[in-house]
Every structure is written in structure tokens, then in C-alpha cells.
Image: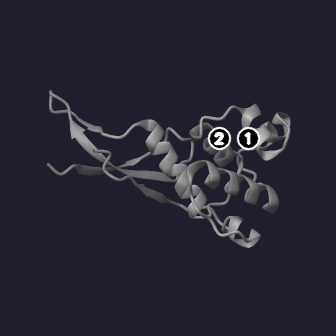
Amino acid sequence: MASRYKTIHYKNCGLDYIYVRAPTAKDEDGDEYIDVSIGEIEKAIATALVRLRVPLRGIEVKFIRKSLGLSLKAWAEELGLSAAGVLKWEKVTKTRLSRVNEAAVRALCAEKLGVELPGTLSQLVGKDKAPKRLSVKLEDAA
């Protein structure tokens, strides 16, 4: 039986522009639910942020770190920075990272997710503007 798909405004990630199209199923009472784990949804969102070169602000950095299951200390060590420095990025949620920091975060995230990216700095830096709406489509988990 083919899954039905439903698009939801995914607000749990803190990014108000994310919409997820995911497979649904019904429980024994006939109630519909999203048939994908939260971890899968969040990794798909992180992958889209990286691939589509969404500008990385503190709010995206924090989301990406958490979606990868990394503590602030582990994330900072991976980037060769102090936890205090990364925390500063995350606290200033609407401020975009510098180009070099954005490229480093995008490259590390891609590595952790197994996403292939081009190697030039200009292709690792995000586009000029954040999207008004970013739709993430999930493959059927079944």
C-alpha cells in the first residue's frame, strides 16, 4: 500500500521557514500521524540547509548542531574553536556567521551527514538571503 504524504509547517526546529513533506500512516483508531522519526526529519532539514546554501545564522547553527546530536563542547572541538565562541554564535540567533565560519560549519555538517559539496569557498558560503519557505521532502521510511 502506498503511503500518503502530508506537508506540515515544521516549527519544532525553531526555523519558521521550514515545511516538511513526509509519509503518513494511520493508527488503529484511524488517526493520521507522520511516519518518520524526528531524528530523520531533522537530519533531512540539516541536509537541505547545507545543500541549498541557506545563509547560516546562530539559529541555524544551533539547529544543525542539535540535529547531529553534538554537545556544544564536541561541536566546538570539531570546528577547532572554544565552546564559548560557538555559544556566542548560537545566542545571536539572527546574526549571520562570517563567510569563513559559515563555510567551516557547512563543510563539517556535510561531512557528518555524508553530503558531498563543492570545495571552493564561494560555493560553501550561503546565498545572500534566507528563503521565505524551504520545503523538505522525505522519502518513504518504509
Image coords of residue 10 (percent x, y): 45, 44
Q: Judge from the rendering whether residue 1 lies leftward or rightward of residue 89; answer left or right.
A: left
* Location of residue 94 with respect to 115 vertically, above or below: above
**Point 71% across, 44% down: residue:** 93
Q: Judge from the rendering whether residue 74 lies leftward or rightward of residue 132; answer left or right.
A: right
| Marks 2 and 1, the one that precedes in the sequence | 2
* Of residues 68 and 4, the one drawn nearer to the viewer in this rendering: 68
Dot 1: element? helix
Q: Which residue is mark 2?
A: 65
- Camera-near label (2 vs 1) is 2
The quadrant where residue 40 appears: top left
Asked if the residues shown at circle 2 and circle 1 are in contact, with their CB atoms under 8 angstroms apart, the answer is yes
Q: Judge from the rendering whether residue 134 lies leftward or rightward of residue 53; answer left or right.
A: left
Residue 85 at least partly seen: yes
Local packing at callout 2 (Cα closer than 10 Å; few below 14, some 14-19, many 20+) is some
Which quarter of the figure is the C terminus placed in? top left
Q: Which residue is mark 1?
A: 90
**Point 76% across, 32% down: residue:** 73
Amino acid type at circle 1 is Glu
Image coords of residue 131 (percent x, y): 56, 62
Image coords of residue 23 (percent x, y): 29, 47
**Point 65% across, 69% down: residue:** 118
* Of residues 130 and 52, the one drawn nearer to the viewer in this rendering: 52
Amino acid type at circle 2 is Arg
* Of residues 89 and 71, the one drawn nearer to the viewer in this rendering: 71
Compute the Cα span from label 2 to label 1.
10 Å
Local packing at callout 1 (Cα closer than 10 Å; few below 14, some 14-19, many 20+) is many
Total numbered labels placed on residues in the image: 2
Residue 96 at least partly seen: no
* Location of residue 33 with respect to 130 vertically, above or below: above
Dot 2: element? helix
